[in-house]
């Protein structure tokens, strides 16, 4: 039986995912001591691939990874053809519209400019509000855009709110809550049905025994 391959989002979600896998009995020593390696064995029957969030979806969609752990933010933005099987409960944050403290970012008649790493999320949100906006894609630290007068507001993920606070910005509108999800390639669900069902059951039991945060 071939190994199950799971793509993990590097960075924010990595520690919680490794903790979860450890808690259900997978030996993640090699992931914790990975150095610059990107594919690491986890126990005898699984291997972990470390990737950027959007690439986790790409690898799972194309079937080179059977499973993936990725934020709902990336799933909503990128979409794709895969099963979303469990809400893992960690990586909790939210999508929000933010702008300068005390400024009514939606006042006046002109078309507003929105900076974001998530143009699809932003476009859908403002379409639903019946607002015509210009969207500018920014790759990182989108908070800079209103400070540099490039945009009237931003659409971004907010976790603790510190980045907004420390840059004189505040949430103007909540869009939706976000958390990490386990996703699965459609063919893998059939090919590795027993192993995946077993893993999912173990994860669900672990999550039910974890205090809700
Ligand atoms: C995200 C997001 C905000 C920040 C919010 O960026 O784009 O900048 O986190 O978190 P907070 O509410 O806890 O301050 P991230 O740190 O992932 O880095 P990036 O800008 O390079 O994407």
Image (tube, rainbow, N blue to C red):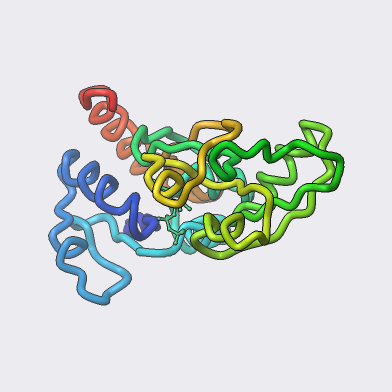
Q: Residue at x 70, y 60 (%)?
A: 136
Please name the residue shown 20% across and 45% down the image.
Answer: 19
Q: In this view, does 95 lie above or below 55?
A: above
Q: Answer with left or right where residue 212 lies relative to residue 115.
A: left
Q: Looking at the image, which residue sits at the far bottom?
A: 36
Between 11 and 97, the residue placed more toward the observer is: 97
Disc tally is 0
171 or 184: nearer the viewer: 171
Figure quadrant of the C terminus: top left
149 shown above or below 110: below
> Image check: 198 left or right of 26?
right
Can residue 190 be seen at all in this image of the molecule? no
Q: Where is residue 212 in the image (x, y as percent from the top left)?
A: 28, 24
Side of 112 where 56 appears, left or right: left
Above or below — where is 78 with respect to 33?
above
- Spot occupied by residue 17 in the image (x, y as percentages of width and height): 29, 47
29 vs 137, nearest the viewer: 137
Residue in the image at 35% along x and 64% along y? 50
Specify whether residue 84 is in view.
Answer: yes
Quarter assignment of residue 10: bottom left
Give x and y (percent) for residue 33. Answer: 15, 67
Quadrant into which the N terminus falls: bottom left
Q: Residue furthest front?
A: 102
8 lies left or right of 170: left
């Amino acid at each position: 039986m071939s190994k199950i391959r799971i793509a993990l989002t590097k960075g924010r979600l990595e520690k919680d995912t490794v903790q979860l896998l450890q808690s259900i009995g997978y030996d993640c020593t090699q992931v914790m001591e990975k150095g610059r390696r990107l594919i690491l064995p986890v126990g005898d029957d699984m291997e972990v691939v470390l990737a950027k969030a959007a690439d986790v979806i790409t690898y799972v969609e194309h079937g080179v990874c059977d499973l993936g752990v990725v934020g709902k933010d990336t799933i909503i933005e990128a979409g794709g053809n895969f099963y979303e099987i469990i809400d893992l409960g960690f990586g909790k944050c939210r999508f929000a519209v933010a702008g300068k403290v005390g400024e009514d970012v939606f006042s006046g008649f002109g078309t507003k400019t929105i900076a974001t790493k998530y143009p699809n999320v932003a476009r859908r949100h403002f379409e639903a509000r019946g607002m015509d906006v210009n969207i500018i894609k920014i790759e990182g630290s989108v908070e800079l855009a209103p400070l540099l007068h490039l945009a009237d507001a931003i659409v971004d993920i907010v976790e603790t709110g510190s980045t907004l606070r420390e840059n004189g910005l505040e949430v103007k509108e909540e869009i939706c809550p976000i958390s990490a999800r386990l996703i699965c390639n459609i063919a893998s669900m059939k090919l590795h049905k027993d192993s995946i069902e077993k893993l999912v059951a173990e994860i669900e039991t672990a999550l039910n025994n974890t205090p809700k945060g």
